[in-house]
Amino acid sequence: MKYCEKCQMQIENKISKCPLCGETLLEQGEKFVEEYPSAHSLHKYRIAIKIIWFAALLVSGALLILNFMTRFQWLWALTGICSVWYLAVSAVFAIRSARNIGLMVLVQTMGICLLTFVIDFSFDFRRWSLNYVIPLALSFSILLLTILILCKPLMLRDFIVYLFVIAALGLTPCLLLAVGLAAVPWPAVAAGFLSAAVFVGMFLFANRKTKHEMKKRFHV
Protein backbone atom coordinates (compact mmCIF):
# COMPACT_ATOMS: atom_id res chain seq x y z
CA MET A 1 0.00 0.00 0.00
CA LYS A 2 1.28 3.49 -0.86
CA TYR A 3 0.12 6.92 0.24
CA CYS A 4 0.16 10.39 -1.30
CA GLU A 5 0.52 13.14 1.32
CA LYS A 6 -0.58 15.88 -1.07
CA CYS A 7 -3.75 14.17 -2.30
CA GLN A 8 -4.28 12.27 0.97
CA MET A 9 -5.20 9.06 -0.79
CA GLN A 10 -4.05 5.44 -0.67
CA ILE A 11 -2.93 3.69 -3.86
CA GLU A 12 -2.82 -0.08 -4.26
CA ASN A 13 -0.37 -0.72 -7.08
CA LYS A 14 3.34 -0.68 -7.84
CA ILE A 15 3.70 2.84 -9.23
CA SER A 16 6.09 5.26 -7.52
CA LYS A 17 4.40 8.55 -8.46
CA CYS A 18 0.88 9.69 -7.66
CA PRO A 19 -1.31 9.43 -10.78
CA LEU A 20 -3.08 12.69 -9.83
CA CYS A 21 -0.35 15.10 -8.76
CA GLY A 22 2.90 13.33 -9.64
CA GLU A 23 4.33 13.46 -6.11
CA THR A 24 6.48 10.60 -4.83
CA LEU A 25 4.40 8.08 -2.94
CA LEU A 26 5.19 6.92 0.59
CA GLU A 27 5.34 3.26 1.49
CA GLN A 28 2.65 2.17 3.97
CA GLY A 29 2.82 -1.58 3.64
CA GLU A 30 3.77 -4.43 1.41
CA LYS A 31 0.34 -5.27 -0.03
CA PHE A 32 0.10 -4.51 -3.75
CA VAL A 33 -2.27 -5.26 -6.58
CA GLU A 34 -1.29 -5.54 -10.21
CA GLU A 35 -1.59 -2.34 -12.20
CA TYR A 36 -2.93 -4.27 -15.17
CA PRO A 37 -5.36 -7.20 -15.05
CA SER A 38 -3.96 -10.65 -15.68
CA ALA A 39 -4.29 -12.07 -19.15
CA HIS A 40 -7.40 -14.10 -19.94
CA SER A 41 -6.61 -17.77 -19.39
CA LEU A 42 -7.78 -20.38 -21.88
CA HIS A 43 -6.85 -23.30 -19.64
CA LYS A 44 -10.44 -24.29 -18.93
CA TYR A 45 -11.22 -24.32 -22.68
CA ARG A 46 -8.29 -26.49 -23.71
CA ILE A 47 -10.25 -29.72 -23.40
CA ALA A 48 -13.09 -28.32 -25.54
CA ILE A 49 -10.59 -27.17 -28.18
CA LYS A 50 -8.91 -30.59 -28.23
CA ILE A 51 -12.31 -32.25 -28.61
CA ILE A 52 -13.10 -30.01 -31.57
CA TRP A 53 -9.81 -30.85 -33.34
CA PHE A 54 -10.26 -34.56 -32.60
CA ALA A 55 -13.86 -34.52 -33.86
CA ALA A 56 -12.72 -32.79 -37.06
CA LEU A 57 -10.12 -35.52 -37.60
CA LEU A 58 -12.69 -38.26 -36.99
CA VAL A 59 -15.26 -36.75 -39.35
CA SER A 60 -12.62 -36.19 -42.04
CA GLY A 61 -11.51 -39.81 -41.74
CA ALA A 62 -15.11 -41.00 -41.86
CA LEU A 63 -15.73 -39.01 -45.03
CA LEU A 64 -12.67 -40.51 -46.69
CA ILE A 65 -13.70 -44.04 -45.71
CA LEU A 66 -17.26 -43.43 -46.89
CA ASN A 67 -16.00 -42.06 -50.17
CA PHE A 68 -13.74 -45.09 -50.65
CA MET A 69 -16.45 -47.62 -49.81
CA THR A 70 -19.21 -46.04 -51.89
CA ARG A 71 -16.98 -44.88 -54.75
CA PHE A 72 -18.27 -41.34 -54.68
CA GLN A 73 -16.43 -38.63 -56.51
CA TRP A 74 -13.47 -37.34 -54.54
CA LEU A 75 -14.80 -33.82 -54.89
CA TRP A 76 -17.59 -34.73 -52.46
CA ALA A 77 -15.12 -35.90 -49.81
CA LEU A 78 -12.85 -32.91 -50.35
CA THR A 79 -15.78 -30.49 -50.02
CA GLY A 80 -16.98 -32.21 -46.85
CA ILE A 81 -13.52 -32.19 -45.29
CA CYS A 82 -13.02 -28.51 -46.09
CA SER A 83 -16.40 -27.72 -44.57
CA VAL A 84 -15.63 -29.70 -41.41
CA TRP A 85 -12.35 -27.92 -40.87
CA TYR A 86 -13.99 -24.58 -41.57
CA LEU A 87 -16.46 -25.31 -38.78
CA ALA A 88 -13.68 -26.50 -36.46
CA VAL A 89 -11.52 -23.42 -37.02
CA SER A 90 -14.55 -21.19 -36.56
CA ALA A 91 -15.50 -22.91 -33.30
CA VAL A 92 -11.97 -22.65 -31.89
CA PHE A 93 -11.78 -19.01 -32.93
CA ALA A 94 -15.09 -18.37 -31.17
CA ILE A 95 -13.81 -20.01 -27.99
CA ARG A 96 -10.54 -18.11 -28.02
CA SER A 97 -12.11 -14.74 -28.68
CA ALA A 98 -13.83 -13.11 -25.73
CA ARG A 99 -14.96 -9.99 -27.58
CA ASN A 100 -18.20 -9.37 -29.42
CA ILE A 101 -19.54 -12.89 -29.26
CA GLY A 102 -22.89 -11.81 -30.69
CA LEU A 103 -21.34 -10.46 -33.87
CA MET A 104 -19.18 -13.57 -34.16
CA VAL A 105 -22.22 -15.86 -33.94
CA LEU A 106 -24.06 -13.80 -36.56
CA VAL A 107 -21.13 -13.74 -38.99
CA GLN A 108 -20.37 -17.43 -38.55
CA THR A 109 -24.02 -18.38 -39.03
CA MET A 110 -24.28 -16.41 -42.25
CA GLY A 111 -20.94 -17.84 -43.40
CA ILE A 112 -22.09 -21.41 -42.80
CA CYS A 113 -25.39 -20.80 -44.58
CA LEU A 114 -23.65 -19.25 -47.57
CA LEU A 115 -20.96 -21.95 -47.71
CA THR A 116 -23.43 -24.81 -47.66
CA PHE A 117 -25.68 -23.15 -50.24
CA VAL A 118 -22.74 -22.69 -52.62
CA ILE A 119 -21.68 -26.32 -52.12
CA ASP A 120 -25.24 -27.53 -52.66
CA PHE A 121 -25.64 -25.38 -55.76
CA SER A 122 -22.33 -26.69 -57.15
CA PHE A 123 -23.45 -30.33 -56.88
CA ASP A 124 -26.74 -30.65 -58.79
CA PHE A 125 -28.57 -28.44 -56.25
CA ARG A 126 -30.43 -31.11 -54.31
CA ARG A 127 -31.51 -28.41 -51.83
CA TRP A 128 -30.19 -30.14 -48.72
CA SER A 129 -28.79 -26.76 -47.69
CA LEU A 130 -32.24 -25.15 -47.88
CA ASN A 131 -34.00 -28.14 -46.33
CA TYR A 132 -31.67 -28.87 -43.43
CA VAL A 133 -28.44 -26.91 -42.95
CA ILE A 134 -29.68 -23.32 -43.14
CA PRO A 135 -32.74 -23.72 -40.87
CA LEU A 136 -30.81 -25.86 -38.37
CA ALA A 137 -27.87 -23.42 -38.31
CA LEU A 138 -30.23 -20.52 -37.66
CA SER A 139 -32.03 -22.51 -34.95
CA PHE A 140 -28.74 -23.36 -33.24
CA SER A 141 -27.61 -19.71 -33.30
CA ILE A 142 -30.90 -18.51 -31.85
CA LEU A 143 -30.66 -21.09 -29.06
CA LEU A 144 -27.00 -20.24 -28.39
CA LEU A 145 -27.58 -16.51 -27.98
CA THR A 146 -30.72 -17.13 -25.94
CA ILE A 147 -28.85 -19.44 -23.55
CA LEU A 148 -26.03 -16.91 -23.19
CA ILE A 149 -28.52 -14.18 -22.34
CA LEU A 150 -30.36 -16.40 -19.84
CA CYS A 151 -27.07 -17.34 -18.15
CA LYS A 152 -25.85 -13.73 -18.08
CA PRO A 153 -28.79 -11.29 -18.22
CA LEU A 154 -26.39 -8.33 -18.27
CA MET A 155 -25.35 -9.40 -21.77
CA LEU A 156 -28.86 -8.78 -23.11
CA ARG A 157 -28.12 -5.24 -24.26
CA ASP A 158 -24.93 -6.43 -26.02
CA PHE A 159 -26.61 -9.34 -27.81
CA ILE A 160 -30.09 -7.96 -28.40
CA VAL A 161 -29.39 -6.61 -31.90
CA TYR A 162 -27.62 -9.78 -33.08
CA LEU A 163 -30.37 -11.97 -31.62
CA PHE A 164 -32.98 -9.82 -33.33
CA VAL A 165 -31.22 -10.09 -36.72
CA ILE A 166 -30.73 -13.88 -36.44
CA ALA A 167 -34.34 -14.31 -35.31
CA ALA A 168 -35.49 -12.33 -38.34
CA LEU A 169 -33.34 -14.53 -40.58
CA GLY A 170 -34.87 -17.56 -38.84
CA LEU A 171 -38.15 -16.77 -40.58
CA THR A 172 -36.47 -17.21 -43.98
CA PRO A 173 -36.77 -21.05 -44.05
CA CYS A 174 -40.54 -20.73 -43.58
CA LEU A 175 -40.64 -18.37 -46.55
CA LEU A 176 -38.56 -20.82 -48.62
CA LEU A 177 -40.96 -23.58 -47.62
CA ALA A 178 -43.96 -21.46 -48.56
CA VAL A 179 -42.64 -20.67 -52.05
CA GLY A 180 -41.58 -24.27 -52.70
CA LEU A 181 -37.79 -23.88 -52.62
CA ALA A 182 -37.60 -26.07 -49.50
CA ALA A 183 -39.42 -29.40 -49.25
CA VAL A 184 -38.79 -30.64 -45.67
CA PRO A 185 -41.16 -28.92 -43.22
CA TRP A 186 -39.82 -29.68 -39.74
CA PRO A 187 -36.46 -27.79 -39.85
CA ALA A 188 -38.17 -24.69 -41.27
CA VAL A 189 -41.00 -24.90 -38.75
CA ALA A 190 -38.50 -25.31 -35.89
CA ALA A 191 -36.53 -22.23 -36.99
CA GLY A 192 -39.73 -20.22 -37.42
CA PHE A 193 -41.02 -21.28 -34.01
CA LEU A 194 -37.78 -20.27 -32.27
CA SER A 195 -37.78 -16.92 -34.08
CA ALA A 196 -41.37 -16.24 -33.04
CA ALA A 197 -40.58 -17.24 -29.45
CA VAL A 198 -37.62 -14.84 -29.39
CA PHE A 199 -39.74 -11.92 -30.63
CA VAL A 200 -42.46 -12.65 -28.07
CA GLY A 201 -39.83 -12.99 -25.33
CA MET A 202 -38.25 -9.68 -26.28
CA PHE A 203 -41.62 -7.97 -26.09
CA LEU A 204 -42.62 -9.54 -22.76
CA PHE A 205 -39.37 -9.60 -20.79
CA ALA A 206 -37.21 -6.77 -22.12
CA ASN A 207 -36.97 -3.85 -19.71
CA ARG A 208 -37.29 -0.20 -20.62
CA LYS A 209 -33.58 0.28 -21.14
CA THR A 210 -33.45 -2.65 -23.56
CA LYS A 211 -36.48 -1.42 -25.49
CA HIS A 212 -34.95 2.05 -25.65
CA GLU A 213 -31.70 0.52 -26.94
CA MET A 214 -33.63 -1.32 -29.65
CA LYS A 215 -35.44 1.85 -30.71
CA LYS A 216 -32.19 3.78 -30.77
CA ARG A 217 -30.32 1.20 -32.84
CA PHE A 218 -33.12 0.52 -35.30
CA HIS A 219 -34.28 4.17 -35.44
CA VAL A 220 -37.92 3.42 -34.63
Image (cartoon, grey):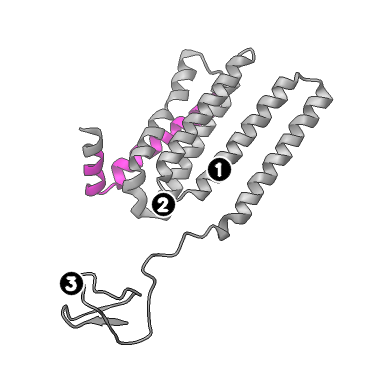
Is-magenta flag for residue 20?
no
User: Which label sits on residue 91?
Assistant: 1
Q: Earlier in the sequence, mark 2 or mark 1?
A: 1
Is residue 211 one of those drawn in magenta? yes
Q: Residue furthest bottom?
A: 28
Identify the residue under disc 2.
150
* Mark 1 or mark 3: whose residue is earlier in sequence: 3
Circle 3 crowding by C-alpha within 10 Å: few under 14, some 14–19, many from 20: few
Q: CA distance from mark 2 to mark 1?
A: 21 Å
Q: Position of residue 28 (x, y in %)?
A: 30, 87
Q: Nearer the viewer, mark 2 or mark 3?
A: 3
Kind of residue indicated by mark 3: Cys
Label 1 residue SS: helix
Which span of residues is magenta-colored?
185-214
Image height of 97 relative to 130, above or below: below
- Say whether residue 132 is left or right of residue 100: right
Residue pointed to by mark 3: 21
Most foreground residue, 106 or 97: 97
Residue 154 in sight here: yes
Residue 195 occupies which quadrant of the picture? Answer: top left
